[in-house]
Image (spheres, rainbow, N blue to C red):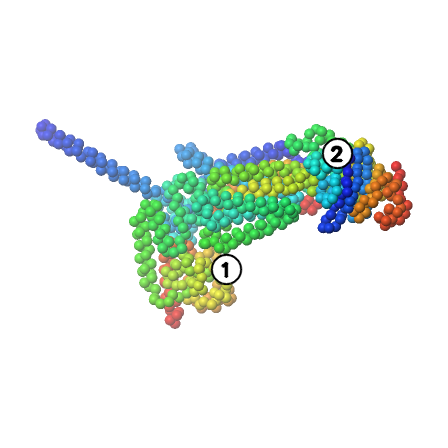
Amino acid sequence: MKPLLPYPVLIAGLAALVGGLAFVSMVVGPATAGTFELFSMMTHGESDTAWMIMREVRLPRTALAMLVGMSLGMAGAALQGFLRNPLADPGVFGVSPAASLGAVLALYTGVSVQMPLALPLMGIAGALLCALLLHGLARRGGMLTLVLAGVAVSSLCAAVMSLALNLSPNPYAAAEIMFWLMGSVTDRSMDHVLLAGPLILLGWAILGASGRSLDALSLGEEAAASLGVDLRRTRTLVVAGTAICVGAGTAVAGGIGFIGLVVPHLLRPLVGHAPSRLLLASALGGGALLLAADILVRLLMFGPELKLGVLTALVGAPFFLWLIFRARTELES
Amino acid sequence: MKLEARGVSVTVHDRKLVENASLQVSGGELVGLIGPNGAGKSTLLRAILGIRAISAGRILLDGGDFLAMPPLKRANAVAFLPQERRVEWRLPAYDIVMLGRYPHQSGFGGPAPEDRAAVDRALDAVDGHGLVDQPVAVLSGGERTRILLARALAAESPLLLVDEPIAALDPYHQLHVMEILRERAHTGAGILAVIHDLTLVARFMDRLVLMNAGRIIADGSPADVLNAEQLASVYRISGSPPQRIS
Amino acid sequence: MKPKRHIGRPFARRALVALGPLFTLVFGIMVFQAVADAQARPQRIVSMNLCTDELLMRLVDPSRIASVTYLSQQSVNAPLGLDGIASKLKVNHGLAEEILMQKPDLVLAGRFTAATAVNLLRKLGLHIVTINPENTLDDMRANIRTIGEAVGETARAEQVIAKFDARLAALQAQIPPGEMPVFADIGVNNFISGENTLYTHIVNAGGYRTLGQALGFDGFRNVPLEQVLLVRPALISTTTAWTSPPSISTMALRHPALRAMVEATPQITIPERYTTCGAPSALGAVELLVAARKAVVAKVGG
């Protein structure tokens, strides 16, 4: 059961894939704007507009797809490793719904019209609030308390979001909220990248620090503790890291599902099943997948642009089902 | 090195799982912790390791407060093989054994040559070299126990606590594991093992500690501990005590 | 001859010397004004919202429109009397990138449409005018004036409003006096329009009260079927404000409890495009409602 590729080769390959897709993402425009029209603009004396589009529209979009995808992949791998459950995903602690709720409240109250950046800021505030709540709970209770609290927080956030939809002043405002919830990185600005980027990097650093403990945890909590793993510290790292990077990502991109669930599954055999090695691999895999999805969204345009979260769920769910069927003997053992 | 529990009690919801228990294990000896189910043996092991909170008493390592030491320092001194044999994910056996080196590693740059050497020695001890590439999940019970034991041995710590290392093994593998433990003790390690098989205990252990209902009721040579009255009162069986053969 | 010429030349020269600067000045002012005019009046206008699409197409020459939404090209959305214009225009899908490529000097957007793209475009320095969705016909008049000012067509905006008002008055003159009968538009999930919605204002302009007004509530609401049955409408709609071509909107009308009422009541179909936006297309709905009044009166009279 040795992995087919040596770990450094796998990482280099995935990094090259991410780089390549980022390049494609910078080059390919929406089908309706003329997929490759930028080239002809550059060679026909309109390079100012072309460069502005590259710098101000495609660069933030590409950067966010990469950052958010990597966060989802890494957090998914960390959570599955920590909970020792292949069904865990970054939504499990209710961080994503809390971030969504913050953003929805910004939309609902109209604050986002006065100040566009209020939307991601309130999303981040929602995620951090949820993380603090979980942290408070985790100090007393165990893992089960944390997951159950996550379910409760998710349900509460979903309920309040439904309430906002229910009470929204007109159908247009409701539609705006719903579209936002579907998840997208279209037309974000560099402001979004600068706002979410540092938090996302911080979240990665925190998650990365948990890596080795996750390996030890595959022997069970008692054995891990006897090996010198500080379980409480590990729990804090995983919860805080996930909340910060996924929360910040959700705040700028909306709800994007299935990346955090599917990517770790895909890559686990390739890293020899070690949770610590899976972190980086899954981050790169998540980045590549979301970049690819965002490119696909542009090429598949027939009418309004598909929302990224819709596409990942649409492709991710059947794929996940197939994965479960194929691997069911493995999962049961 | 000497690990000592002094007057340790573990209480959960007003129920005393371990009450005022004192024992010690030193380098070079193989000590058996025996007693019927529910006597508090596993709880005592966990309490000594600091995995379970104690309500009274102290744990001392060479006279110093063991529980006050940082987790990695503790792990360097005392290795532990829990009863739980489940391994998550399909990690290959080699990686599992390497996890025993966790307390020695910095976390950067992967395993050092001395880590690989220690893992090789541990695999030698359990005769596990043929299993290294297989996921532990597909190994048989005996193979899995050997690999997990190798994981505990790979730490090469001066003290080793093992919880029921031979449960669910066939007689051949039981003997094999007992021989590994004795070998390790005779090369200087102090081992405290929870074991149910009284015949093997009598045959391999240097000293026995007998627990019942959360208390330690005997501590001494196998011949002293395994006498007819003790067995009759604790295990509710009668007969002549097993003889030490080797 | 020579002196004459000499006499004449200095005169002409003097005249030229005197008139030249004046002429230059006048001509210069004219050119300057034309340029300034062109600068003040945007020449490459993009509309990112279905409702601003219609107002824009009514206010400026198609040559000044850089693009409208792709929705406006769909025949179900064709504004009243403007068929064919949108199909000759370029379209956008509310994406920042395609709009930047069209290099607009003015972008019209609805307050709730493509907010992220609008924010990005604003940040990149584009001139953007956002309008609120219309809740009344006065909102519509205000929005026409806002856009008229933005595109430099204030006079034409007044013309559009005057033409709308004149046609509306002519239609309303045909409405018999007395209490307004109830017009029932039962939407998906019994979604019904009450007081203070654009839809209700359009229906009122056509001489009817909506079911929601008869039941007495504000805004849009889901109403239980038994409550719907309490009101006897004079006219029933077979479409609703919430339908698209594959319509399930008339499902409520097929409910057994409603069937008797539906069969006994005159029906009309008001295309959705007449009630979606606060725009002159609303006259289409008013026309249909006023025309249907004859059937209602005949029914009531008979």
Q: Chain of mark 2?
A: B
Q: Secondary structure at mark 2?
A: loop
Residue extending farthest to the bottom is: C302
Quadrant occupied by the N terminus of chain C:
top left
Q: Residue at x 33, y 48 (%)?
A: C148
Q: Which residue is mark 1?
A: C189
Q: Chain of mark 1?
A: C
Q: Which residue is mark 2?
A: B157
Q: Secondary structure at mark 1?
A: helix
Nearer to me, A174 or A125: A125
Quadrant occupied by the C terminus of chain C:
bottom left
* The disc label shown at residue A304, or none: none
Tags 2 and 1 both on a single chain: no
Vertical placement of B113 versus C210: above or below? above
User: x%, y% of residue A53?
Assistant: 44, 37
Q: Residue at x 62, y 47 (%)?
A: A137
Q: Is residue A296 visible?
A: no
User: x%, y% of residue A122?
Assistant: 50, 45
Q: Amino acid at mark 1?
A: Asn
Q: Is residue A242 visible?
A: yes
